[in-house]
Image (spheres, rainbow, N blue to C red):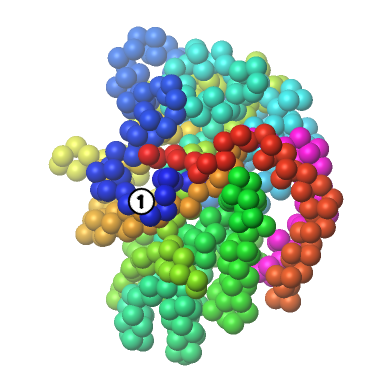
């Protein structure tokens, strides 16, 4: 599932404001932004005679292409499943997909890309990342401006302001961004029934959370006090980090507010990382954190009733699965916690893009049909993309609304692990849809939890922590030597905080000093010189 929010960390988002955030984002944030108005809907595709010709099903032979992408769920996808066959039939495609767990994706796919063994369509970070920007500048990927003009549903799915950030200095675009809503709280979910049984009130501060974890460990229940959801341990805990004053991004320097510095130079950020290490040392945080390559291990434990607190995790998924193993279980969400030094917790807001994909320049002969297919997924194929197959992934209620079938209640061929690897992009207009969210809760059998969930969303969103760095500003030195000096001086220590219990904050800072001396400080200086606007970004207001 980030990076940014309103102009002041004390500003409260009203309920009406939350319900209109998407509209605000599309009409106010991005200068010159085009109106989505659900332009990727099947109805619009049918209404436009030109669109009828641009489906994935009007060519006699299926379009065959290879595709690599990360997967956030369990990597259990198997080829030849029923959903895959339905997509291939309706879209007239044959996709040879390779998936890689998200925790391993960047390292694995960069090796593949650097070796020139790229598939026809490949996920990456795009021009906001020096590695991918360098490959782009070297001509590895196809320029797509003409295809965006030819296939309007694709162009309209992404706000104009985001397309502008994807363009190079010539206005050329090579990358299709995967959009995310900028406010994505990673809640601190907990077993309310266990807390009640042990007489532990809901924590309101970091100190109270730590005390609660200690009591759970001492209870003799043989249960993991705290684990994390399906991603890196530190990213899953990003919103707990805000209670330490860390937004996991660049922030103004305390010495010079006109200079922004990376998180590695922020005391609050290091305090949080080493606090989490200390929790692991004491047996209060999952011993598999940072070790187990299967990102789903924490959710598996929580759903099986073997963990009391989980950082991140989706209530619609957690609750029904947990009730199967522990019928008396109850899950609640902690309100944002007050930090050890009185900081007010909230949510780390994100730049509205999380990866995306390129088309290999060597696949140019397939490009027109690929973009025709992608356009089809946003028009005539939109219902399959968004809802799946009736009776298999959703049912229709008396109001005619499509109610999702919970993943655990689906046949194996229609579970999320079989669908996610075949996904491409969704339009921004679908990124915060409260009606769809409520139907998801209904499908999971927990509709009574929806208003509670929405209220907690508002609580987290009320105190945003932003990344002050513009992700499209890149340092020439970073592009030239950044990855190498990080590997030389920081990769081991930064990746070892949760695996090397003897690593100290002082040792980390000493390694970072060497990194700065080797060129890291020059990278920071260049970012500050190139990024003229260093004010707090605002993606939703």
Q: What residue appears at the point 61 percent right and 18 percent down from the top-left corner?
A: 171
Residue closest to the eye, 270 or 324: 270
Drawn side of residue 217 relative to residue 480, left or right: left
- Farthest residue to the left: give it: 398
Residue 94, quarter of picture: top right
Inspect this view and state whether residue 377 appears: no
Residue closest to the eye, 415 or 15: 15
- Farthest residue to the front: give it: 256
Inspect this view and state whether residue 466 appears: yes
**In the displayed structure, would residue 293 be above or below residue 280?**
above
**In the displayed structure, would residue 356 be above or below residue 445?**
above
Mark 1 crowdedness (10 Å alpha carbons): few <14, some 14-19, many ≥20: few
Residue closest to the eye, 435 or 368: 435
Q: What residue appears at the point 56 percent right and 13 percent down from the top-left corner?
A: 146
Main secondary structure found in the magenta portion: helix
**In the displayed structure, would residue 259 be above or below residue 323?**
above
Residue closest to the eye, 449 or 423: 449
Residue 349 coordinates in the image, percent (x, y): 47, 48
Q: What residue appears at the point 64 percent right and 23 percent down from the top-left corner?
A: 168
Residue 445 coordinates in the image, percent (x, y): 26, 58
Residue 302 coordinates in the image, percent (x, y): 45, 69
Query: Dot 1: what SS?
Result: loop
Write the start and end of the magenta stretch as one range. Answer: 472-500
* Residue 480 shown in magenta: yes
User: The C terminus is located in which quarter?
Assistant: top left
Residue 28 coordinates in the image, percent (x, y): 38, 30
* Residue 215 shown in magenta: no
- Residue designated by label 1: 11
- Total residue callouts: 1
Q: What residue appears at the point 55 percent right and 22 percent down from the top-left corner?
A: 370
Drawn side of residue 492 relative to residue 541, left or right: right
Residue 287, quarter of picture: bottom right
């Amino acid at each position: 599932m980030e990076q940014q929010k309103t102009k002041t960390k004390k500003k409260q988002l009203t309920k009406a404001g939350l319900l209109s955030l998407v509209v605000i984002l599309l009409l106010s944030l991005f200068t010159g932004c085009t109106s989505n108005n659900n332009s990727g809907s099947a109805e619009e595709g049918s209404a436009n005679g030109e669109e009828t010709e641009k489906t994935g099903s009007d060519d006699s032979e299926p379009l065959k292409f290879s595709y690599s992408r990360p997967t956030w769920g369990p990597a259990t996808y198997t080829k030849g499943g029923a959903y895959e066959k339905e997509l291939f039939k309706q879209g007239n495609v044959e996709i040879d997909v390779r998936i890689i767990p998200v925790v391993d994706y960047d390292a694995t796919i960069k090796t593949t890309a650097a070796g020139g063994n790229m598939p026809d369509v490949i996920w990456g970070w795009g021009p906001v990342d020096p590695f991918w920007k360098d490959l782009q500048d070297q001509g590895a990927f196809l320029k797509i401006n003409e295809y965006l003009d030819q296939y309007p549903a694709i162009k309209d799915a992404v706000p104009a302001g985001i397309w502008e950030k994807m363009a190079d200095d010539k206005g050329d675009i090579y990358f299709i961004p995967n959009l995310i809503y900028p406010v994505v709280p990673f809640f601190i979910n907990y077993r309310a029934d266990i807390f009640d049984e042990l007489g532990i009130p809901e924590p309101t501060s970091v100190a109270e959370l730590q005390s609660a974890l200690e009591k759970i460990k001492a209870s003799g229940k043989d249960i993991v006090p705290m684990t994390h959801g399906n991603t890196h341990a530190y990213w899953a805990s990003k919103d707990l980090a805000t209670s330490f004053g860390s937004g996991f991004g660049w922030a103004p320097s305390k010495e010079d507010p006109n200079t922004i510095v990376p998180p590695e130079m922020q005391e609050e950020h290091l305090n949080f990382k080493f606090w989490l290490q200390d929790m692991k040392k004491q047996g209060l945080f999952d011993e598999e954190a940072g070790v187990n390559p299967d990102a789903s291990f924490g959710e598996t434990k929580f759903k099986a009733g073997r963990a009391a607190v989980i950082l991140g995790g989706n209530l619609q998924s957690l609750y029904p699965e947990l009730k199967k193993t522990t019928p008396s279980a109850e899950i609640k969400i902690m309100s944002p916690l007050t930090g050890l030094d009185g900081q007010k917790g909230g949510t780390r807001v994100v730049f509205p893009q999380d990866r995306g994909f390129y088309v290999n320049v060597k696949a140019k002969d397939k490009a027109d049909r690929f973009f025709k297919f992608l356009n089809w997924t946003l028009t005539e194929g939109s219902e399959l993309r968004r809802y799946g197959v009736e009776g298999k992934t959703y049912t229709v209620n008396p109001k005619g609304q499509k109610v999702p079938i919970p993943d655990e209640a689906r046949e194996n061929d229609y579970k999320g692990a079989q669908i996610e690897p075949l996904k491409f992009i969704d339009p921004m207009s679908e990124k915060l849809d409260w009606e769809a969210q409520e139907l998801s809760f209904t499908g999971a059998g927990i509709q009574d939890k929806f208003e509670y969930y929405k209220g907690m969303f508002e609580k987290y969103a009320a105190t945003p922590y932003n990344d002050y760095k513009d992700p499209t500003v890149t340092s020439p030195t970073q592009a030239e030597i950044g990855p190498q000096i990080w590997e030389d001086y920081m990769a081991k220590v930064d990746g070892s905080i949760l695996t090397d219990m003897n690593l100290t904050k002082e040792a980390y800072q000493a390694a970072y000093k060497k990194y700065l001396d080797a060129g890291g400080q020059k990278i920071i200086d260049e970012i500050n010189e190139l990024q003229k606007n260093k004010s707090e970004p605002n993606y939703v207001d």
